[in-house]
Image: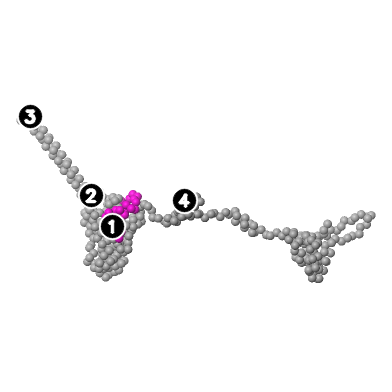
Amino acid sequence: MSDATFQTFLTSGLFVLTASIGYLAWSAWRWLDRARDMEKAALVGVGFELRMNLMRMIRELAGVADGSIQSEIQLVPVVHPQLDGILIRPNEADRESLTMMRGNYNELDAHKKTLRAALSGQGDVGAAANVAVDAVIGSIATLYLWEEHKGASPKNAHSTRSWHVRDWMKANDFRSDLLPGLHLRDAVVDRLRSLGMTLTPQPLTYTASEFYAMQYDRKADRNAPFWKRKPKPVPVIEETEEADAAAEPEMVTEPEMAAEPETVAESVPEVESSSETVEEPVEEASFDAADAVEPDTLPEAEQTLPEAELETVQEASDATQPETVDVDPESGPEPKSQTPGSVH
């Protein structure tokens, strides 16, 4: 073999080898890519399968409610081949979400069997239908998390506006009036919120009038809605001053005592009857009251009193006067004996 022929053979062999390696690499990449695409399609099919089963379950429950379905034969068993195929082989999907979906299927199947038994006359149809409706609401919430949040759990899903959930249900033909006596979209939103998902805005706690009445003051804001005014705080100092004024006893002045001669005259005999045992403060108070009586008003008071009382008043006035003692001018004045209550 010549040198030129050998070089041609070597070059051709290398080219064929390179082409073969390229083809094998492309085939392996294509096989992996197709497997990945098929896996994605299977995961999408799992959501579509769950949606179809839920729509059929909702139609059956609506038929039971309006009376169009009265036989257990009309209820189709729940099947899920797509989910079973995904769970058999390993894949890159979230196994936790797939397990949750399988649990929802088991719940739907069990409630449908209970409903079929109730329709055959072995139980209460209303109770079985209500439990099945609750399972449907939970399955719709799981389907939303599977399609919009990549199968994340409610607590790990990112915060979402509640109208996004409603738009998703509207796009998937989940109307709010599919089940009689229930607003389906509101029920799904409430279920997601109860499972721990953050949905905004939060439910309203107060009405508009109650909220603005708590936040605004007419004096602070001239444009405040509803023109609500906050209650004024009651000052504590005024209340204490009024309480102190009410607690103080009424003081009787001298003019008021002088204006009541009858009461003064009545108190004098009591002092006379107990002059031997009365203490000094009582005598001073009685004589002060007697001195406060004006001379013009005392005779008028004596005229109005009875004769017996006039005598006692006269005796009391005589007893209050000091005794006169004869004093010898040579011996000098002697000190007078001071009696209790004497007036100097």
Would residue 16 be visible to someone looking at this image? yes
Q: Which mark is residue 40?
A: 2
Q: Which residues are magenta?
A: 152-177
Q: Crowdedness of circle 4 by 10 Å Cα count: few (<14), some, many (20+)?
A: few
Lower sequence index among marks 3 and 4: 3
Residue 174 is marked as 1
Instruction: Report x, y in % for residue 121.
Output: 26, 70
C-alpha distance separating marks 4 and 2: 58 Å
- Amino acid type at mark 1: Phe
**Residue 223: image tag:** 4
Q: Is residue 168 magenta?
A: yes
Residues at marks 3 and 1, CA–CA distance in whole angstroms: 76 Å
- Residue at 5% of width from left, 29% of height from top? 2
Q: Secondary structure at mark 1?
A: loop
10 Å crowding of disc 3: few (<14), some (14-19), many (20+) = few
> On the picture, is 160 further left or further right than 249?
left
Which numbered disc, 4 or 2, marks the residue closer to the eye?
A: 4
Q: Is residue 220 above or below residue 266?
A: above
The residue positioned 58% from the left and 54% from the top of the image is 236
Do residues under tags 4 and 1 come within 8 Å of each other at their CB atoms? no
Of all residues, the one furthest to the left in this rendering is 1
State the residue in front, 296 or 2. Answer: 296
Q: Quadrant of residue 287?
A: bottom right
Mark 4 / mark 1, whichever is N-terminal:
1
